């Protein structure tokens, strides 16, 4: 019974991870880890924008 309650709780919270065909608890991230991840995503987005603007052909207007 305890396992069922735990599985239900996990499925209703951020701990739920449906990968690998089974449920398991995920480790929660610290504030610093979340900041680092957000910063990495922002840098990637900036790099992609820079690449996209480089690929735009110069119309010579």
Image (spheres, rainbow, N blue to C red):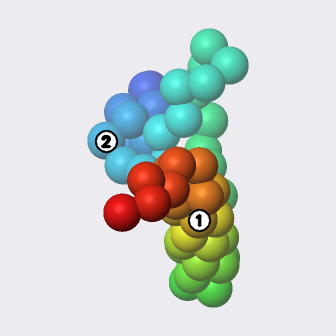
Q: Is residue 30 visible?
A: no
Foreground mark, 2 or 1, reads: 1
Residue bearing mark 2? 12
- The residue singled out by tag 1 in the image is 50
Q: SS for tag 1?
A: helix
Q: Which x, y percent locates residue 7?
A: 45, 32
Q: Assign the C terminus to one quadrant of the image.
A: bottom left
8 or 50, nearer to the observer:
50
Q: Earlier in the sequence, mark 2 or mark 1?
A: 2
Q: Residue furthest bottom?
A: 32
52 above or below 28? above
Q: For the point 62% across and 36% down, which residue is it?
A: 24
Above or below: residue 18 compared with residue 31: above
Give the side of residue 26 with respect to residue 49, left or right: right
Which residue is the extreme one toward the top? 21
Q: Residue at x 53, y 26 (%)?
A: 18
Mark 2: which secondary structure? helix
Q: Position of residue 10 (x, y in %)?
A: 44, 41
Q: Is residue 55 above or below residue 41?
A: above
Viewer-side residue, 48 vs 17: 48
């Amino acid at each position: 019974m305890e396992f069922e309650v735990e599985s239900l709780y996990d499925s209703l919270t951020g701990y739920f991870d449906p990968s690998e065909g089974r449920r398991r608890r995920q480790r929660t991230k610290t504030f610093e880890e979340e900041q680092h991840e957000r910063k990495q995503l922002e840098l990637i987005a900036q790099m992609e924008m820079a690449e996209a603007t480089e690929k735009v052909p110069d119309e010579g207007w």
